[in-house]
Amino acid sequence: MTTTTLITVAPTGAESAKADVPALPVTLDELVATAKECEAVGASVVHVHIRDAAAKPTLDLGRLRETVAAMRSSTDLIVQLSSGGAVTDPESDRLAVLEAGPEMASCTMGTVNFGDDVFMNRWQFVVDLHSRMQERGIVPEYEIFDLGHLAALQRLLGRYGLPAGGHVHCDLVMGVPGGMPGTTEALVACVGAMRDLPEGTTFSATGIGRTAVPVLLASLSAGGHLRVGMEDTITYAKDRPVESNAQLVARAAAFARLAQRPPMTTTEARALLGISVTR
Ligand code: KMH
Ligand code: ZN
């Protein structure tokens, strides 16, 4: 059982509108300020979606490069760019995200219904993403929205080999309407399926909306790591909007300490994930 906890913060996402969620960080300055606050209270990875001047989701490469550079100069967080983007983003733009040179990027392991939309991840697209990350030395976080995505990951690794760095890390995204539920039972089923993945595979978990805390507790008790943030949760408790991403990271860090698994440092997180230090 691991003795520390990797905490990833997903501060923005592509789904909430700034007009509805004023505390959502959408400008570069807001994103960097949020990242610094979250690092101070226990985050070691930041999962980044960016917005344009109108606060709409974008995969503009220039903005992505600027964001990676700003995060690097202001924090020691591992920068994980989202290759998922928004459900409307074309595959070519999602692949081009890798050209911004992050240490990590997400790689979703299959198509899933996503509320009233569909989050498309064709097999050949997933293979392209995985292979391009291998070529560029970018460490993937495999996003798992449903149990079958773990079988797809086993198939991917069997056919195309281990990711850059040699370590396999998954993130269970639970409670999306259309994906697996945010329950202990679903998490335990995933832990069982992960036994077929390479030895040493690690996972974090995040629960969407009101499943945030139950999933956090289930993950800690199962030896998993944590992802929290306003991409996934904009309500801290009943009738209480989230005030900041740091509020969510601080709560996760407190639970991790209670579980006798305090937050990892960024150095420990790089060692776990197989990220070589290039700074
Ligand atoms: N915004 C979702 C459609 C990822 O970042 O890789 C996809 C997503 C997953 O958030
Ligand atoms: Zn995301």
Image: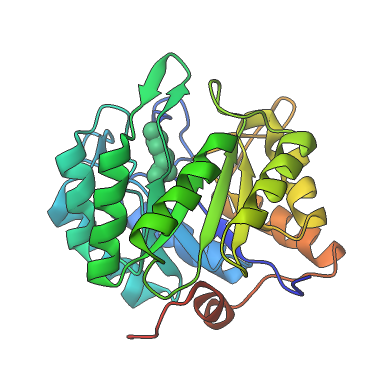
Residue at 81%, 67% in the rendered image: 257
Residue at 39%, 66% in the rendered image: 163
- The answer to whether residue 230 of the structure is visible from this angle is no
161 over 107 or under it: above or below: below
Q: Quadrant of ligand 1?
A: top left
206 over 163 or under it: above or below: above
Residue 223: percent from left, percent from top? 76, 61
The quadrant holding residue 239 is top right
Residue at 86%, 63% in the rendered image: 258
Horizontal side of 83 relative to 230 (left or right) equals left
Horizontal side of 74 relative to 193 (left or right) equals left
The quadrant holding residue 208 is top right
119 over 168 or under it: above or below: above
Horizontal side of 212 relative to 143 (left or right) equals right
Residue 50: percent from left, percent from top? 30, 46
Residue 128: percent from left, percent from top? 24, 50
- The answer to whether residue 24 of the structure is visible from this angle is yes
Identify which residue, 176 or 202, lies in the foreground: 202
Identify which residue, 99 or 189, lies in the foreground: 189
The quadrant holding residue 88 is top left
Furthest toward the front, the residue is 159
Residue 222: percent from left, percent from top? 78, 55
Identify which residue, 63 or 22, lies in the foreground: 63
Q: Quadrant of the N terminus?
A: bottom right
Residue at 55%, 21% in the rendered image: 177
